[in-house]
Amino acid sequence: MTIRVVLVDDQALIRAGFKAIIDSTDDLEVVGEADDGATALAVVRDARADVVLMDIRMPGQDGITTTQAITRDDDLAGVRVIVLTTFELDEYVVSAMAAGASGFLDKGVDPGTLIEAIRVVAAGDALLTPKATRALLASLDDDSTATPVDEETVKHLTVREREVVGLVGQGLSNDEIAETLFLSPLTAKTHVSRAMTKLQARDRAQLVVIALRTGLTRFEDL
């Protein structure tokens, strides 16, 4: 199955470079492009995109606002957004994740990492570096290490599901969670899926945010 990608960037040269990389693979295809946030939403919808590579800084409507418009549109519930920027600043990480982005990458990323990132978010996984996760956690609470667990939000989770969500918040994959908790990968995946359903998480990236907000993942765990 081919992963359908839309490029949103005001620089034609950047779009051309990403398109050449993406179209060189057998399982990815660029199906649409936009040079500003105002037209991106229509392009994403018309092209039936799976993943959007979204620039942050664009004239007019920026990438954060556009990402939020995509992730809050029920008709685009399956679309994942990777935010791209040349500025690795913490406030961008926070804003991108708050807007519903599934990933955050520097524009200088190498081709192999870019391709793998698209595959990762298309599969519903989060794409967060440890630095990005720490920035997000720090932004949620100035004294994150002292934040108690939000029992009201997580009350429906089992003890094992709480453990799993905490590890998701640390950026661990299902295989890594399985190894940490001495589970099979399938069991770990099942716990993650059930937790997402109970917490109404749109995707794994949202589950990371919930883990941080509820105190299941703490600053010292990262």
Image: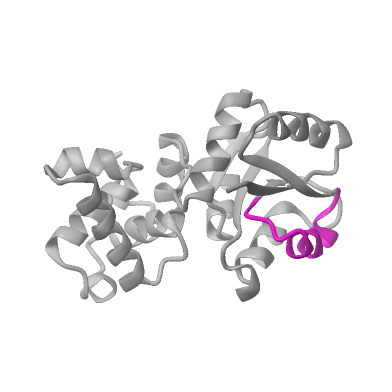
Residue 20, placed above or below residue 1: above
The image quadrant where one finds the C terminus is top left
Residue 71, placed above or below residue 176: below
| Residue at the spot 42% in from the left edge and 43% down from the top edge | 133
Front residue of 173 and 92:
173
Front residue of 53 and 221:
53
Is residue 147 something that shows in the picture?
no
Image position, residue 154 (x, y; %): 25, 70
Image position, residue 152 (x, y; %): 25, 76
| Residue at the spot 45% in from the left edge and 48% down from the top edge | 126
Indicate the quadrant where residue 25 lies. top right
Image position, residue 79 (x, y; %): 60, 59
Task: Tally the numbered discs.
Answer: 0
| Residue at the spot 26% in from the left edge and 59% down from the top edge | 190
Image position, residue 83 (x, y; %): 63, 45
Indicate the quadrant where residue 185 lies. top left
User: Is 46 positioned to the left or the right of 121 in the image?
Assistant: right
Front residue of 63 and 178:
178
Find out whether residue 56 is within the magenta segment: no
Residue 70, placed above or below residue 126: below
Region of the chain picked out in magenta, as a range? 35-51
User: Is 58 positioned to the left or the right of 108 in the image?
Assistant: right
Front residue of 140 and 46:
46
| Residue at the spot 80% in from the left edge and 59% down from the top edge | 43
Find out whether residue 44 is within the magenta segment: yes
Colour approach in the figure: one colour
Is residue 187 something that shows in the picture?
yes
Indicate the quadrant where residue 45 lies. bottom right
